[in-house]
Every structure is written in C-alpha cells, then in structure tokens.
Amino acid sequence: MQKILVKDLSEYVGKEVTLSGWLYNKRSSGKLKFLLLRDGSGIVQCVYFKGNVSEEIFEIADKIGQESSIEIKGKVKAEPRSPGGYELDGIDLKVIGESKDYPITPKDHGIEFLMDHRHLWLRSSKQSSILKVRARIVKAIRDFFDNNGFILVDTPILTPAACEGTSTLFATDYFDLGQAYLTQSGQLYAEANAMALGKVYNFGPTFRAEKSKTRRHLTEFWMVEPEVAFADLNDNMNLAEQFLEYVVQTVLKDCETELKTLERDTSFLKNIKAPLPRITYDEAVKILKDNGVDFEWGNDLGGADETIISNQFDRPVMVHRYPAAVKAFYMKRDPENPKLALALDVLAPEGYGEIIGGSQREDSLDLLIERIKEHKLPQKYFEWYLDLRRYGSVPHSGFGLGLERTVSWICGLDHIRETIPFPRMIYRNTP
Ligand code: 4AD
Ligand code: MG
C-alpha cells in the first residue's frame, strides 16, 4: 500500500493508496459519508459507503470532529466534478489525534478572533495558499539574484545605531556595551560587502518600532536588499524593474492554483514587464495637484498620496528624486539640484503603495560626515561606514523590497497581517 500526497493522486488512478492529514470538513447523505482530507499539498474527498466498510469505520466517519488528524485508505478514481479532479472510494479510516469543538468553523469569525487563533487559522485554504505564494516569491527573489551574479551576504540583526532614522528603533540591553538596536535595514553592512564582492544582496528580518496602525505596516518584516558597486540611480532603476518583472511573472506561472483560491484578478499582474514608468517627485506632486490634493512641495508622500499617484498607471511606477530633507542620511544629493536626493521608491498599483525604497549612496567622505551630523547620529558608530569612503570609494546604489508588502499586493489582500505566519504589529505580539 502506497502512502502518497494529495497532489500526486493523478498518478494512482485505479490503485489503493493511503493518505495522512486532517479532516477539513465532512457531510453525509444516508448511507454515504463524505470526508474532506487536507494534507498540506491539497484537499481530496473520500467517500465511505455503508455497505463497503465495517460498522466501526462508518461510526468513526460519523463522529469524527473537524481537524482531527486521520489516516485514510481508499481507491483512487478520476472525478471531474471534484476540485482537484480526483476522489477516493473509502476502504479504511484511522484517527491519529482527535479534535473536538475546533474553534474555527465555516461561519464568519471576526478578525480579532482569527488573529487570536492564528496558529490554527493557518490551516485554512486561503491562509495556506498565501503561505505557498510567499514561499514561491522568496524563491523567485533568491533565484533572480543568484542567477544574476549577486552574492548572498548575511548582515547583523543586533546593531549599535540607526539606519533609517532614530524614531523607529527597538532597543535592548547589550551586556556592558549599553544599548543595541534591532536592525531596521541591512543596507549599511551590505554596502561594505559590495565593496568586497561587487554585487551582493541580503535577505532577512528587519524591525521598525512603527507607531503606524495601517494595513501596510508590521513591526517585524522581511526585506531583500541588493547593493551594487559602480552603479548609479539609473542602473538601480533598471535593476528594480527587471527584478520585479521576474518575480511577478514567475509567481503567476507557478502559483496559478493558489491565486485562483485567493480569487486574485491577475490582469494587472500580467502587465508587469520592464520597462516600468518613471516619474520624478516633482511630476508626482503635479499629479496630486491635478487631482485636487492640497500638497505642499517638500513633504513626503503619504499612503493616500501614493494611491492617487499609482492609480494613474497600470503597473508599478518608479518615483525618483525626492526632497533630500524627507529621506535617509546616506542618500546622495542630485548634482543638478542639491535639494533633491537620488532616491527611488516603487509604488505598486491597485493602492498597495511603496514596495521598494532605495537610492544612490553618498560616496563623498566629507558630505557623508556632514549628513551624519545633520541627522544627529553618533559618528563614532559610523566610523567603519565612513571607512568605505576613505578607502576606494565608488558610486554605488541599492534598494530594499519589503517581502510582506509584495505578498499582500501579489495575493491581492486587504491587510498585511495575513502575509506572514505570525505577524507582529503595534497592538499584537501573540500568538
Ligand atoms: O524604504 P525603506 O525604509 O528603505 C530602506 O530600509 C533602505 N535601507 C533599503 C535599501 O536601500 N537597501 O524600506 C524598504 C521597504 C519599503 O519599500 C517597504 O516595502 C518595506 O521595506 N517596509 C515595510 N514593510 C512592512 N512594514 C513596515 N513597517 C515597513 N517599512 C518598510
Ligand atoms: Mg521608504
């Protein structure tokens, strides 16, 4: 007797097989019991006919509770009317672990209830589809960089100083050395690696003590950050658009089933091919004004502004050259206009907002020291970073893509909390 997975049923038509999993749902009709088994790879219906199995098995099939773990034995047959195309004629049924009064039922539960039961909610077909898409996005990201000459580097999570502004730092005591902070971005360390290896990327968890309670903010999220030596802002934009095209098209190709389960309208996603539209911050401000927004030049774009701007385009739009005053200390100024930073944000369509933030980096030692002072950062912790400008400085650029925002957008979700198994947000750090 072969022990198989639901996803492989097509290879076993006419054969008797064993499957292990959990009872997703059940119904009965007279002498028939219909059990839905899910095993992580898919869902299959197993039909038990009273005349074909013992009294005992029929009894178990009747009493068994939702989400009990079970082992079923049955004969595989093609069944065009069932979702996966196959069904089992039940022969045997064993309960591995009982489940009584499973808290999540097919009725509507409020979001807080579901979040409190996140450890169980993950078993639903919507949530598990999201996790599969997430895993595929991660692999596509890695494949893109690995196949394009980038070296993976791992950057530290415990750091002595801020990277993206001091207002969103999580602090922790660090022995006799005072405070350490959970990293907001691996970028500064990626820059050092790029000076050693040329083209690098880091990919890991990052932390922001974000006081924002929005559908786009987590306090712990994953970011992938490429960094390239001898690359300017234009090269950075070329990289970003090729990267996005690869990730989106790969996921569309490989996650058809999951995107269908999520009822994702993929028409916008199919458009995502390089080149992507590029506009300056000035042009973005004009779009806002033309749409009746009372926007003052010099402000950062808010979530609502980003939505208005991205609604003008059918694919992600790259906005570049922001006012330096609203951007991070390490960004290089535009030689044509020192009020501007050579910054780049990519705004996703359909109201998903910023998914990528990046820039060309300041490569002059003197200007970088000035910026560190302006931003009131502790220069002693940046001496190593300044060394990169002291010893063979080169123009270089990079960006960071937020994994969860990307998952949210590709899956078409209402809120970022469903994009990671256990989300961390301002009002939630459990389960
Ligand atoms: O724009 P950010 O802050 O850029 C950086 O951290 C740069 N150091 C990256 C670099 O150039 N290497 O963040 C980059 C991306 C954002 O565009 C967004 O997708 C995501 O990280 N992000 C968040 N995602 C979820 N929750 C939050 N609180 C996020 N903050 C940023
Ligand atoms: Mg940003």
Image (tube, rainbow, N blue to C red):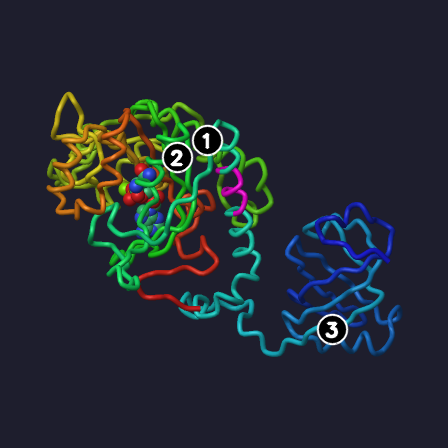
Report the residue at 87% width, 53% height from top.
15
Residue 174's tag is: none
At label 1, the amino acid type is: Phe
Residue 209 is left or right of residue 66, and the answer is left
Give the residues in magenta: 135-141
In the rendered structure, which disc, 1 or 2, sits on the residue that comes first in sequence?
1
> Gap in Å between the C-alphas at discs 1 and 3?
49 Å
- Answer whether labels 1 and 2 touch (C-beta < 8 Å): yes
Q: Is residue 18 magenta?
A: no
Q: Residues within 10 Å of mark 1 (few under 14, many from 20)?
A: many
At label 3, the amino acid type is: Val
- Answer whether labels 2 and 3 touch (C-beta < 8 Å): no
Q: Position of residue 47 (x, y in %)?
A: 78, 63
- What residue did someone put label 3 on? 95
Residue 265 is left or right of residue 66, and the answer is left
> Gap in Å between the C-alphas at discs 1 and 2?
8 Å
State the residue in front, 350 or 376: 376
